[in-house]
Image (tube, rainbow, N blue to C red):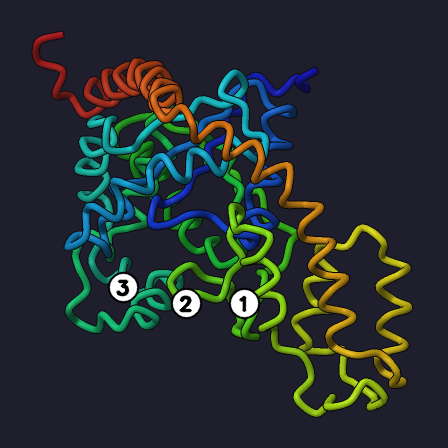
């Protein structure tokens, strides 16, 4: 039974740049499945336009992954009867709203956004940053506001973007009259999942993540590659738990917290080999991924049904977008023929 939060609208989404992985699962997918039972209205956006901001020369990559990310979300429990799925590019009103918002933000303000600055540095853009990438906070404001959503689950690194989005809300309302609600971020309490190589972030592009549809053999291969304690050569050697990726994953995914704590103490004393803790993690991950993988494989046998979910959801969303833009055009005084 949904809680009485009928006035609030939740929006979540993914960029279709590859299949989703365990980092996505704990960072966002679990919470969006929970939120669809707590809020009366939820939207899930496949952000293909956003994906093109740094994949403009590889549209095929974006195109083929639209169904893949939909499959991943359906497999973990996102329900199209509770959450409306839609494809960003098929809602032209988002682009129209972005154009109006572009007039409310200066170039200097965009360059100051720490989230955008960090991502520009990671991708090595420098001064050759695509304008669409730099203007990401503006387009995100349009993504959120076109369907009147105001509840946005985010990681801490995205808070500066939400802050700038709310600046746009305030500027639009002050200039044209009260039109949009302030956006409320729901901060994820889950720390970012490290990569299997010990890198600070599990990433599709770095190839250091366990995918939700990885086979049992592939999960085993990746776990056996995991970074542990390089000085823990023999099982009898005392080992370090901090920075040990296997224990990081056990802490995150093993439901037997007391059992993991005992293993940590034994590992630190010596007498516990890396292979043994990796075997435990393989079992834990397979218990988690087996039902997801099984459901995903069943859904993937009927791609037409997936596209129908996306088509129906996009059509419902488009109606809301048209209503929003009618209100916006009236506020901006360009509703000449209405």
Asked if residue 179 lies left or right of residue 264, the reply is left
Horizontal and vertical percent for residue 298? 51, 28
Mark number, residue 195: 1
Residue wearing tag 2 = 206
> Real-space Cα distance between discs 2 and 3?
26 Å
Neighbour tally class for label 2: few under 14, some 14-19, many 20 plus, Cα within 10 Å: few
> Nearest the camera: 319 or 194?
194
Q: Which residue is painted at 24% across and 52% down in the image?
A: 135
Q: CA distance from mark 1 to mark 3?
A: 29 Å
Residue drawn at (17%, 71%), measured in percent from left and top? 127
Label ID, residue 111: 3
Residue 276 locus on image (x, y percent): 78, 71
Residue at x 63% of width, y 59% of height: 191
Seen from the viewer's position, the closer of residues 40 and 313 is: 313
**Mark 1 or mark 2, earlier in chain:** 1
Residue 151: image location, x then y, percent: 52, 34
Q: How many marks?
A: 3
Question: For numbered disc 2, what is the local secondary structure?
Answer: loop
Circles 1 and 2: CB atoms closer than 8 Å: yes
For residue 62, above or below residue 233: above
The mark lying in front, picked from 1 and 3, is 1
Q: Is residue 160 visible?
A: yes
Position above or below: 72 against 201: above
For this view, does 297 lie left or right of residue 34? left
Distance in Å between CA atoms under marks 1 and 2: 9 Å
């Amino acid at each position: 039974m949904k809680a009485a939060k009928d006035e609030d609208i939740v929006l979540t989404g993914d960029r279709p740049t590859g299949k989703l992985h365990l980092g996505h699962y704990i960072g966002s997918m679990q919470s969006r499945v929970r939120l669809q039972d707590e809020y009366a209205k939820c939207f899930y956006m496949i952000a293909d336009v956003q994906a093109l901001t740094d994949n403009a020369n590889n549209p095929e990559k974006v195109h083929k992954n639209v169904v893949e990310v939909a499959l991943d979300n359906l497999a973990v429990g996102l329900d199209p009867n509770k959450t409306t799925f839609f494809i960003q590019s098929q809602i032209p009103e988002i682009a129209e709203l972005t154009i109006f918002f572009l007039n409310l933000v200066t170039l200097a303000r965009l360059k100051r956004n720490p989230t955008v600055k960090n991502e520009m540095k990671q991708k090595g853009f420098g001064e050759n940053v695509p304008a669409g990438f730099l203007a990401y906070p503006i387009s995100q404001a349009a993504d959120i506001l076109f369907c009147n959503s105001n509840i946005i689950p985010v990681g801490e690194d995205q808070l500066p973007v939400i802050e700038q989005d709310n600046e746009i809300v305030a500027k639009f309302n002050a200039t044209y009259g009260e039109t949009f609600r302030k956006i409320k971020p729901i901060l994820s309490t889950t720390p970012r999942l490290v990569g299997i190589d010990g890198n600070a972030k599990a990433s599709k592009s770095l190839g250091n993540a366990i995918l939700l549809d990885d086979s049992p053999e592939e999960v085993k291969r990746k776990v056996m590659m995991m970074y542990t304690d390089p000085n823990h050569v023999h099982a009898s050697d005392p080992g370090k738990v901090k920075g040990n990726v296997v224990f990081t994953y056990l802490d995150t995914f093993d439901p037997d917290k007391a059992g993991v704590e005992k293993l940590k103490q034994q590992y630190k004393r010596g007498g516990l080999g890396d292979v043994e803790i990796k075997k435990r993690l393989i079992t834990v991950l397979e218990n988690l991924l087996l039902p997801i993988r099984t459901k995903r494989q069943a859904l993937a046998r009927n791609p037409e049904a997936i596209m129908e979910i996306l088509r129906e959801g996009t059509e419902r969303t488009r109606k809301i977008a048209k209503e929003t833009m009618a209100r916006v055009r009236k506020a901006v005084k360009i509703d000449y023929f209405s």
